Image: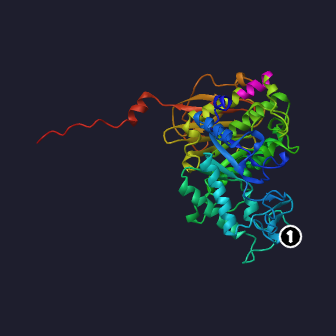
Amino acid sequence: MPYVKEMGFSHIELLPVEEHPFDGSWGYQVTGYYAPTSRYGTPAMFKEFIDTCHQNGIGVILDWVPAHFPKDEFGLGRFDGTALYEHQDPRRGEHLQWGTYIFNYGRKEVSNFLIANALFWLDEYHIDGLRVDAVASMLYLDFCKNDGEWAANEYGGRENLEAVEFIKHMNSIVSKRLPGTMMIAEESTSWEGVTKSADDNGLGFTMKWNMGWMNDFLFYIKKDPIYRKYHHNNLTFGMAYNYSENFVLVLSHDEVVHEKSAMIGKMPGDLWQKYANLRLSYGFMYGHPGKKLLFMGGEFAQFNEWSESRSLDWHLLRYKDHQQMQQYMKDLNHFYLSESAFWQQDYDPHGFTWIECDDAESSVVSFIRRSQDKELYFICNFTPETYEDFRIGVPFAGTYKEVFNSDAEKYGGSGVVNKKAAVSEKMPWNHYQNSIRVKVPPLGMVVLERKVTEEAKAEKKPAKKTEKKKA
């Protein structure tokens, strides 16, 4: 807990701690829906763990799996010898690729069992939110199935209408009984209205994992910088649909296993470029609208893929490169927490504006993040070129000071920083009437802040009221 707090993370998300028989499932094949796994202690110890998190100001999100369950005889499968919790018809009742059963959401006893289970973890253990696993597999009857392996709904469609009704009902009950609870969907398709309220014909989730952004960004960042200009749209496309849902940007466990490589291993170039690319990746992610999720080990650039059978490679922190990466993430987290422009208007179009998003040739993007009373200016350079005199447009005349730079020497960068503030010039650029010139580091991110003069502050203050003279 001291580590999480010191690093500046606001929440931790736990892979499923509900009892499960097979370590290699990572908890995603649950047999004991009402039991914290005995691997780590007793229910009382789990409560103490959650309480300690809260005392340290750390929220706790729990992965929860209502999409399927394993066939172990001591679990829910064929509980009384019949298909009690699952469908009798295997076309509706089984996930062939996982070897598991699908809940029969149309049975009130089953939906009540699951809704009560969600409330149990939230109420009994004071969990702050549930990340609902594999929502897409619940919504579509043909999920990962071939023709002949699934049965259509009553209207001949592929939507699982019973599962949709269950999800809406569950989220409605949770929001009414435990307001403020986060209900987060891992939903990988373009299903409309995942984070709209059930009353507005949505599914009622609070947030949705942005799998599209994750896939596009990782595809882009893995490219050698010389080829990135041909895939520039993968970097910027996420903003085209950003306000369709309340998104969480994720770099999760699924991306650092099964020979996909750890985050640092995905980065192209020599060792210096790998670290620079990784700092840039995290910086761009934090600047992009949406809440943020990073898998453990990524903050200090673990090279090995994650495995449930061993600890993280904490021994790497004996080496300077990993220490500098960890320091970078610590500073980035605390910078994020201290600046409301990062997060206050994530889901409001006013909170983000592109300055330049079409400069594919240079592979540089720039944008503004806003809160109600603050603006931050981001410049991200996805090439190893250094720009000593890079011009960007700004909406206001004034002085712009660098407040964060991923290329600082203390992070292992080359030290291309802006020691002096940039003064705007009356030169139109990027559809603005004013512009500034700044240094942009190789494979680096620069964040600027406009310095507001005392005269400008005085202009914003309301005029003092004067008494009217009596007639």
In-front residue for pair 225/291: 291
Secondary structure at numbered mark 1: loop
* Residue 319 within the magenta-colored segment of the rendering: yes
Quarter of the image where the C terminus is located: top left
The prevailing secondary structure element of the residues shown in magenta is helix
Residue visible at 72% across and 22% down in the picture: 409
Protein image colouring:
rainbow
Quarter of the image where the N terminus is located: top right
* Above or below: residue 149 compared with residue 66: below
In-front residue for pair 243/155: 155
**Residue 185 location (% of width, % of height):** 68, 54
* In the displayed structure image, the side of residue 165 where residue 460 appears, left or right: left
Asked whether residue 192 is in view, the answer is no
Q: Quadrant of residue 228?
A: top right
Farthest bottom residue in view: 155
**Residue 174 location (% of width, % of height):** 58, 56
- Name the amino acid type tagged 1: Glu
In-front residue for pair 348/76: 76
Q: Quadrant of residue 243?
A: bottom right
Residue visible at 73% across and 38% down in the picture: 281
Asked whether residue 185 is in view, the answer is yes
**Residue 254 location (% of width, % of height):** 80, 46
> Callout 1: few (<14), some (14-19), or many (20+) C-alpha neighbours within 10 Å?
some
Q: Which residue is mark 1?
A: 149
* Residue 252 within the magenta-colored segment of the rendering: no
* Above or below: residue 446 compared with residue 202: above
* In the displayed structure image, the side of residue 350 where residue 14 appears, left or right: right
Q: Quadrant of residue 112?
A: bottom right
Farthest front residue in view: 80
* Above or below: residue 308 compared with residue 131: above
Query: What residue range appears in magenta?
Result: 318-326
* In the displayed structure image, the side of residue 107 where residue 23 appears, left or right: right
